[in-house]
Image (cartoon, rainbow, N blue to C red):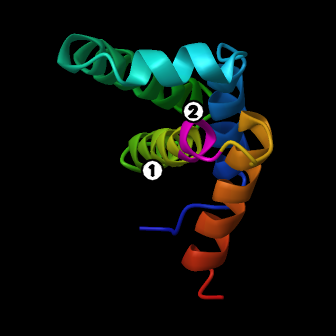
Amino acid sequence: MKPPSQAKCPAASSGAMVAAGTFRCRPITSAMARIGTPLQERELIKLASLASALAGALRKRGIADPAASLTAEAGIAVFKIAFERWVSEASRPGLPQLIRESFGELQALTAGK
């Protein structure tokens, strides 16, 4: 099995950035995050749907499974980490910047840096 190329990460990054575009207001989003289990369950369903759509888009670009699914799930994981940082760190930059930083950290980790 060939290792996945780095070309997949920009595709996953693009999907995460599209998701980030839906979050414009930190205080509202932060308050919603504290509401509880029903919203958390909805969030998990939405993230699973987004991962499935992203994996499907990768497959259409010629990336076979399991690489397409793995890349999509990694993109969602990056989004989730960046989102958590965004709602908890008031002095941090915007969500798109945090997504870029998180992808950079993941790429450095997987490259052994």
Amino acid identity at mark 2:
Leu
Q: Which residue is mark 1?
A: 67
Q: Residue at x 34, y 24 (%)?
A: 48
Horizontally, residue 65 falls left or right of residue 44, namely: right
Q: Where residue 32 sits: x, y (%)?
A: 43, 15
Q: For residue 16, what is the image quadrant? A: top right
- Cβ atoms under marks 1 and 2 closer than 8 Å: yes
Q: For residue 28, what is the image quadrant? A: top right
Q: Where residue 1 sits: x, y (%)?
A: 41, 68
51 or 57, which lies in front? 51
* Main secondary structure of the magenta stretch: helix
Residue at the outermost left position = 37
Which range of residues does the magenta coloring cover? 85-89
**Does residue 48 lie above or below 38 as drawn?**
below
Give me the disc on residue 58. Answer: 2
Q: Within the magenta stretch, is there residue 44?
A: no
103 or 92, which lies in front? 92
Horizontally, residue 1 falls left or right of residue 41, namely: right
Amino acid identity at mark 1:
Ala
Q: Within the magenta stretch, is there residue 86?
A: yes
Which quadrant of the figure contains the C terminus?
bottom right
The numbered mark, 1 or 2, whose residue comes first in the sequence reads 2
